[in-house]
Image: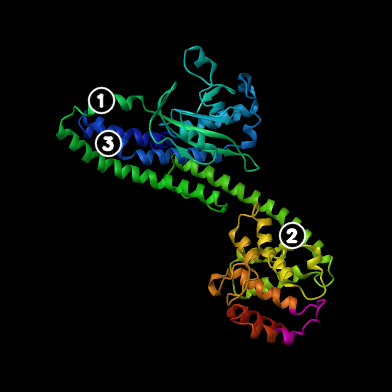
Amino acid sequence: MKKKRKILNSFKTKVTLLLILAMILSAGLCNFLIYKYALESQFNQLREKLMIIAQTTALSIDGDLISQIPLEREGVNSEPFKRIFKRLQEIKKVDPILKYVYTMAKTDKPGILQFIVDADADRHKEQSGEIVSFPGDKYDASRFSEMMKAFDGPAADKKLGTDEWGVLLSGYAPIYNSKGKAVAMIGVDIKADDVFALQKGFHEREIVILILGIIFSLIVGTLFSDKIMRRMQKLVEGTNRIRAGDFKYQVRVGGRDEISELAHDFNIMAKSLYLSNKKMHKYFYRAMQALIRVLEAKDAYTVGHSDRVAEYAEKIALKMQLPEDEVDLIRDASRLHDIGKLGIQKTVLDKKGKLTEEEWNIIKEHPVIGEDILKPVVFDKQMLAVVRYHHERYDGTGYPDQLKGADINRLASIISVADSYDAMTSDRAYRKALNKKEALAELDKGKRKQFDPMIADVFIQLLQEEGS
């Protein structure tokens, strides 16, 4: 009973049943017209679907593992090849319209690629006369411009193409290693030889049958393709969210067919990426915090500054009842907000007297330098915004971008208040620290000028409550 239910829930079964229904309702010959219309009206959707399949499959392939495959015929016996080969065959089973699934890498010659793993790599097939590709076999890709673009991002052929494997429509996507480098690309092909044969006969059909076939194709094809594409769109949305750095995103696809299984595998992968990314960022933040402490330790006046700013900013965020993830982010960002000072000359940072205009302009570069330091490894736009904008002023006279009012990132505005308060209540070479009462007066005075009035009021209230 369970096996029977599984067969009925299969995506392949649903497609087969639909085609049988189409042949019955279209009275035989109309079935050909349905295929013609589907090919013409849904060509772009088919290209998009191929890109989705290629992109989703590429995310499930280990780029470091594929780099270990020897690029020679005996490479088929290697363990990395067998694992990738098994994965590609699983992809072919998920969607029965796929004819070929393969991976390729660049060579030293422009326009020439070489096979790594082909899901049809089988010596028995080769002996029977079929075209089979093995690791290291060369392929002239200069004929297919979209294939050459596949190492930069997802792509699909804009028209049917012909090579030694037949007439095909193909989708491609890059495969990245753990360092984010595109080490290979994956291609998925749909066989299209029979399309040309059908096109020759379609023009000879009677006009009435053509109209009936088009109407039927519109009704059935639209309803069915919309249902499929809604589910596939969820997968591509998930892929885009992961690419944008949202590793918490989970794809919700109903059903019990292969697409739902693919979505399940995607969610497992996304969770794994999230945990790995979180662990990597923890190591990075610790390293950066160590550098900040080294920077602060060189100046007795700034020792512990970033930790105090983090403490104040966290209290403000909690008082404002911000979400837990924003509280965590503001705590980490506070400790890194002055990281750009690592790029400022020590003579300028340590100067005891008044800075010249040129030296002050150098100091004002540190928010941008900080953003540049973090950008290659930090994908959270909020974190980068906090580092860049923590010296913007509410009245628009801050730096580096002279943002004003609500245009300033809210978390950056919180750190601006906390940073200023710690600076006011700490000794400096050029002045003594203000007491708490004096600092509170300065905060109140700076509302709507330097500080966001709502955030300043929250902090003033918080400090007064602690004092009482």
Label 2 and label 1: CA atoms lie apart by 69 Å
Residue 464 visible in the shown view: no
- The percent position of residue 125, horizontal first and vertical second, equals 49, 16
Find disc 1 in the rendering and name its residue: 200
| Rendered view: 284 above or below 133 | below
Find disc 3 in the rendering and name its residue: 37
Where's the C terminus, which quadrant?
bottom right
Please name the amino acid that badge 2 sits on. Gly
Please report the residue visible at 32 percent of the width from the left and 28 percent of the height from the top.
195
Is residue 425 inside the magenta stretch? yes
Eye-nearest disc, 2 or 3: 2
Please report the residue visible at 69 percent of the width from the left and 63 percent of the height from the top.
332
Residue 183 visible in the shown view: yes
SS state under label 3: helix
Which region of the structure is painted magenta? Answer: 424-439
SS state under label 1: helix
Find disc 2 in the rendering and name its residue: 343
Q: In this view, does 139 lie to the left or right of 294?
A: left
Mark 2 or mark 3, earlier in chain: 3
Crowding at label 1, few (<14), some or many (≥20) Cα neighbours within 10 Å?
Answer: few
Please name the amino acid that badge 1 sits on. Lys
Mark 1 or mark 3, earlier in chain: 3
**Magenta residues, dominant SS class:** loop
Q: In this view, does 226 lie to the left or right of 283?
A: left
Q: Quadrant of residue 399?
A: bottom right
